[in-house]
Image (cartoon, rainbow, N blue to C red):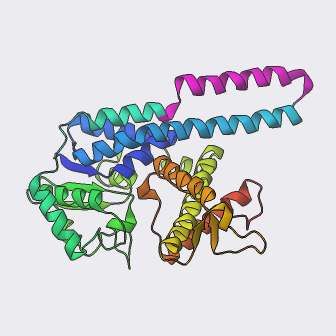
Amino acid sequence: MAIRLMVDTCVWLDLAKDYREQPVITALEELIGSGDVELIVPQQVLDEFDRNKARIAEEARRGLQSHFRLVRLAVNRFGDNARRADLLAGLNEVDHRIGVDGDAVGESIERIDGLLRGVPALATNDGVKQRVTERALAKKAPYHRAKNSVGDAILVEIYADIVSTATADTPCAFITHNTKDFSDADGDFRQPHGDLAHLFEAPKSTYRIAMVEFLKEHSPDPLGDHDFEFNYSQEARRLSEILEAEHLLSRQVWYNRHWNLRTKIEKGEHEVVSEQDYSRNPYRADQTLDSVWELALAAAKKTEDEVGIENLGPWDDFEWGMLNGKLSALRWILGDDSDTLDA
């Protein structure tokens, strides 16, 4: 009995960015190859993966190169004089290979790309578009949050079409890591949001927030001897992951502060002035020099292109507190003062 499986883009990207997830990709490849799983790929997911895969690969390479730079500094400072040259030569070769050949992340991206392109992509038809509009007007999940949720809503409506033909003998499943938009907001985040609960009635439909959870429930054998709970879940984060997360958080915090200032300017609470009107003595907190503001706008556009506008808020008070807390903790780990949040 094949189960029809739809996977959110965020799951594919998370599988791609961490080489330790390759056993999961292998298990999924085997299930699809054996016919136990039929992959459903909306065009929306394929497009989003295409837009982000280069960024994921580059961030992984940049993180690894940053890691090796730190290792080289440590070798230079603490390494044994007799072995230092050989160690540095080896590290330089690895660093070069990362830049030229890529790494395991590139392999994961290629394998996932093969899975996504191995089946015909489902286009977003007019019926889906109409229901997305109706969902937006009714502010039903994933439109219950103050953000652009068109892409998420398209997935919901395409999955609704799949569920409409599902039975206990031909079930379907949806996997996402985006618990904020799809999960129960006030209860168990492993359960779907109340607006979506009707799409996940057992035994014909399943909602899961982790690929491993789905694999263990439906077909545990392909994971084989991979002691996932011990070797993966308990493994410390790599330095490259920490650096990547710190960079993203710093961009998010800076962008939110920039947008708050932009809002004040639009409301007339803050003024952008020319050099001749700018007050330096005394300093005025309600003024920004026009040349500085132009640089800030350019930096904001660069941040949007680098991070993706969908990853830049808006945030509620709880989410904003979590962002600052995470950034503070990571910078403490990297050696900065724990209260250093300057972007």
Q: Main secondary structure of the magenta part?
A: helix
- Residue found 38% across the figure and 70% down from its top: 189
Q: Nearer the viewer, residue 94 or 215?
A: 94
Q: Quadrant of residue 98?
A: top right
- Residue 120: % across, % down: 17, 37
- Residue 238: % across, % down: 63, 46
Q: Is residue 225 visible?
A: no
Q: Quadrant of the C terminus?
A: bottom right
**Residue 62 located left or right of residue 192:** right
**Residue 315 located left or right of residue 11:** right
Q: Nearer the viewer, residue 122 or 7?
A: 122
- Residue 37: % across, % down: 23, 44
Q: Quadrant of residue 324?
A: bottom right
What is the span of residues highlighted in magenta in the rendered image?
80-105
- Residue found 67% across the figure and 21% down from its top: 93
Image: 118 above or below 158: above
